[in-house]
Image (tube, rainbow, N blue to C red):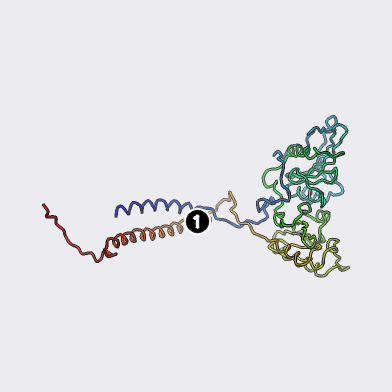
């Protein structure tokens, strides 16, 4: 039996550390899909644009440099411009929307190069969610896409892009083939925050990518930003006072264009309550008491529909047929993210529970190991006796004494 005992002990030595390591693994807990810093969730949010330039991670640096790519600020010989903290000073016509997006400060600078001029307005926000929202607010649908920063678009001599928590609005006196490269050089000097503040809104990941026009997406955190970016529903019906945020996009379906609106609420209960009000408004139709907005008036009545999934309320409108609009609506699914929170301290109850789990796991592993060893040793011995033509059990062996008298 000694030759069987040694492999058995080695097997137990290998199994025991594995059992203890398995028992000490951290347990997963449910994490809300809306982290505190708007990070998220599915790969930190998939933005409709692709990052094409790198920036310095110096959040306390000046928003705009004195010169770049041959452009020199006219303030080099004058007083250095000071940042403004009042959104009305940065953009009086859109001050309410900027405030909703978390505006913190702005810097305006004029640059010259030979006879050309360049006016740049840099707007900084609390995080990247606000910056993307402001960028989508200023960018009109149909503007050509540019490869600058995290996302960019242009309208003749005006080029708009965002990076981190900063939005850059530039106005050239004369656009050239090198204007994009020059702005990419500028983007490399823009200070961006580190951590969750540099992540885009997670709600963007809920927008279906098929047939979507990425240059028509809009993100809103309040009624001013929602209405200013062409929101489909009346702002008071959305429920921004309850912490809602919205994402909209246009889809090129076969039967016609459709607009998908996603409203994200803090809890599914809030979403259920708001869905009832939105459904009642849409069902009542365009009446003098509750008139439709311009986008709803231009939509196919049969294609207008509302649906809820978890804390998300989705509304489809536009000129598509009912079947295609319904298919687009049902393509939005809410998925709760499950992950462990790193660095979460354990209390005494959690430590006791982990100890009990470790003990139970060890007992189960030892029991399974004993059964496997019994099968291996007992079965192997029985097979050995069977191959030698003896009975499987040794109960039937005859006991006798043998004396060697050959000498």
The residue positioned 72% from the left and 47% from the top of the image is 50
Count numbered badges in the picture.
1
Query: Residue 323 falls in which quadrant of the image?
Result: bottom right
Q: Nearer the viewer, residue 359 or 232?
A: 232
The answer to whether residue 104 shows anywhere in this view is no
The residue that label 1 is drawn on is 352
Q: Is residue 403 left or right of residue 269?
A: left
Q: Nearer the viewer, residue 22 or 136?
A: 136
Residue 407's x, y, as percent? Answer: 10, 52
Answer above or below: position of 44 versus 293: above
Outermost residue toward the top in this view: 77
Outermost residue toward the bottom in this view: 284
Q: Is residue 388 left or right of residue 152?
A: left
The residue positioned 84% from the left and 46% from the top of the image is 155
The residue positioned 71% from the left and 45% from the top of the image is 51
Residue 277's x, y, as percent? Answer: 78, 66
Answer above or below: position of 347 versus 324: above
Residue 22's x, y, as percent? Answer: 49, 53
Answer above or below: position of 351 versus 273: above
Residue 103's x, y, as percent? Answer: 78, 47
């Amino acid at each position: 039996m000694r030759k069987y005992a040694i492999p058995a002990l080695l097997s137990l030595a290998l199994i025991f550390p594995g059992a203890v390591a398995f028992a000490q693994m951290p347990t997963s807990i449910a994490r809300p899909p809306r982290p505190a810093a708007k990070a998220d969730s599915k790969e930190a949010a998939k933005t409709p644009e692709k990052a094409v330039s790198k920036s310095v991670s110096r959040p306390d640096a000046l928003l705009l440099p004195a010169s770049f790519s041959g452009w020199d600020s006219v303030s080099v010989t004058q007083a250095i411009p000071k940042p403004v903290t009042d959104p009305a000073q940065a953009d009086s016509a859109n001050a309410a929307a900027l405030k909703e997006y978390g505006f913190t400060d702005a810097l305006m600078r004029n640059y010259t190069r030979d006879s050309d001029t360049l006016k740049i307005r840099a707007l900084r926000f609390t995080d990247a969610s606000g910056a993307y929202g402001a960028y989508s607010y200023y960018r009109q649908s149909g503007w050509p896409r540019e490869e600058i920063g995290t996302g960019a678009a242009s309208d003749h001599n005006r080029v708009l892009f965002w990076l981190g928590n900063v939005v850059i609005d530039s106005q050239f006196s004369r656009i050239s083939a090198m204007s994009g490269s020059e702005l990419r050089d500028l983007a490399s000097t823009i200070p961006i925050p580190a951590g969750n503040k540099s992540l885009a809104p997670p709600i963007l990941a809920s927008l279906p990518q098929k047939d979507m026009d990425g240059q028509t997406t809009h993100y809103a955190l309040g009624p001013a930003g929602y209405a200013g970016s062409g929101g489909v529903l009346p702002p008071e019906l959305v429920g921004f006072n309850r912490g809602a945020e919205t994402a909209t996009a246009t889809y090129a379906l076969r039967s016609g264009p459709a607009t998908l609106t996603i409203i994200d609420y803090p809890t599914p209960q809030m979403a259920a309550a708001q869905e009832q009000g939105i459904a009642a408004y849409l069902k009542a139709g365009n009446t003098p008491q509750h008139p439709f907005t311009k986008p709803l008036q231009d939509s196919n009545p049969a294609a207008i529909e509302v649906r809820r999934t978890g804390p998300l309320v989705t509304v489809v409108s536009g000129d598509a047929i009912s079947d295609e609009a319904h298919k687009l609506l049902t393509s939005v699914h809410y998925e709760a993210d499950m992950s462990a929170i790193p660095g979460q301290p354990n209390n005494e109850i959690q430590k006791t529970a982990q100890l009990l789990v470790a003990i139970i796991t060890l007992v189960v592993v030892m029991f399974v190991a004993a059964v496997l060893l019994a099968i291996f040793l007992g079965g192997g011995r029985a097979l050995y006796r069977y191959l030698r033509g003896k009975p499987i059990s040794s109960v039937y062996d005859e006991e006798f004494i043998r004396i060697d008298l050959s000498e």
